[in-house]
Image (cartoon, rainbow, N blue to C red):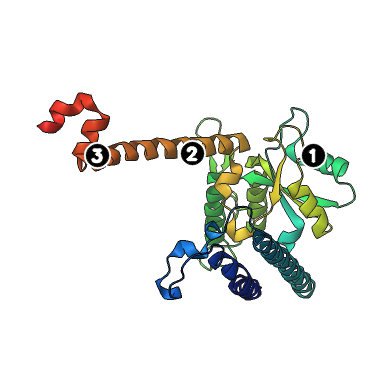
Amino acid sequence: CSIRIFSLAAILCLFGILPVHYFGRKMHRLEISSEQLHMFTVGNVEVQSRWLWVHSIVLYIISGVACFLLYVEYRHIARLRLIHLKRATVNPGQFTVLVRGIPKTTNESCSTDVDDFFTKYHPSSYLFHQVVYKAGKVQKIITGAKKACGMSDPSTDTTLDQSCEAITYPCSLCGASSDSFRLLPTAEVAKNIDNEFWNCLQECAAAFVFFKTRYGALVASEALQTSNPTNWVTDLAPEPDDVYWSNIWLPYKQLWIRRIATVLGSLVFLVSFLLPVAFIQGLSRLDQLQKKLPFLDGLLKK
């Protein structure tokens, strides 16, 4: 497409615009290699000359053909993209939207709020959702507990008596017996660990929402859900390997403040960098500094 546009522009300019510019005034001609550059510009054409119409018409032709070729090229690219999407395997990320800034309510959970919101505003395309939970240190503790549980599995330990019974001993005060320990099955221990894990998890103000069609996911990701731009912020979900989970746990308002702080920090750094650089550059032109800043005349002479 670019070759076609520039080829057409080169031909029209070479045989249309360039002669009009070069012969725009009656004057003595030299060899083309010896002519100055302004001889080939529109400034060499006389004022109110009729040949300016040639210049304008050629430029309009180049612009119109360039727009038409770009339209044809982008239509071809869009057709190829649709063919690729039809032939490619279905990617779940194309049907998923990441929602952040979910407002918290006192009566219902975050999962219920998400389900109610998208069932109300996207009833035809909404499928289901998954709320993001803040695991963090809890996940590490649970993983360590499961490893410890696996190490003490009676089915893998041949030295442990699987018919272990509670050891009783007489109490020194009342003479009653007491259990020293009780061996639980590994499956029961793992189940208890999983239950405690889900009880310890904390819901975040973010969720992955799944839709029935790509179009429904795209519409939900591009549309402004509420009048408050910091609530119900929707974007197409990134790939699982591209998700930085620690940032998803953070409130969206805090991320918004961080972006502003980053911009302000960049401006402060830029100003603090330009001031000494400008001062050092000014020292190399003392004569100009004396003219623009007369009050520094004595200092600059020293």
Q: Is residue 139 toward the left or the right of residue 209 in the image? A: left
Of pointers 1 and 3, the one earlier in the residue sequence: 1
Looking at the rendered image, the disc whose residue lies closer to the viewer, 1 or 3, is 3
Residue under label 1: 112
Q: Secondary structure at mark 3?
A: helix
The relative height of residue 137 versus residue 3 in the rendered view (above or below) is: above
Give the residue at the far top of this rendering: 295
Question: Along the horizontal axis of the image, is 244 left or right of 29?
Answer: right
Which label sits on residue 263? 2
Task: Name the residue at 53% across, 56% down.
Answer: 43
Of the image marks 1 and 2, the number of the one nearer the N terminus: 1
Give the residue type that dot 1 points to.
Answer: Thr
Residue that numbered label 3 is attached to = 282
| Front in this rendered view, residue 36 or 181 | 36
Dot 2 amino acid type? Val
* CA distance separating discs 1 and 3: 64 Å
Say whether marks 2 and 3 touch (CB < 8 Å).
no
Quadrant in which residue 201 is drawn: top right
Which residue does the image show at 76% across and 70% down from the upper left?
72
Packing grade of label 1 (10 A; few <14, some 14-19, many >=20) is few
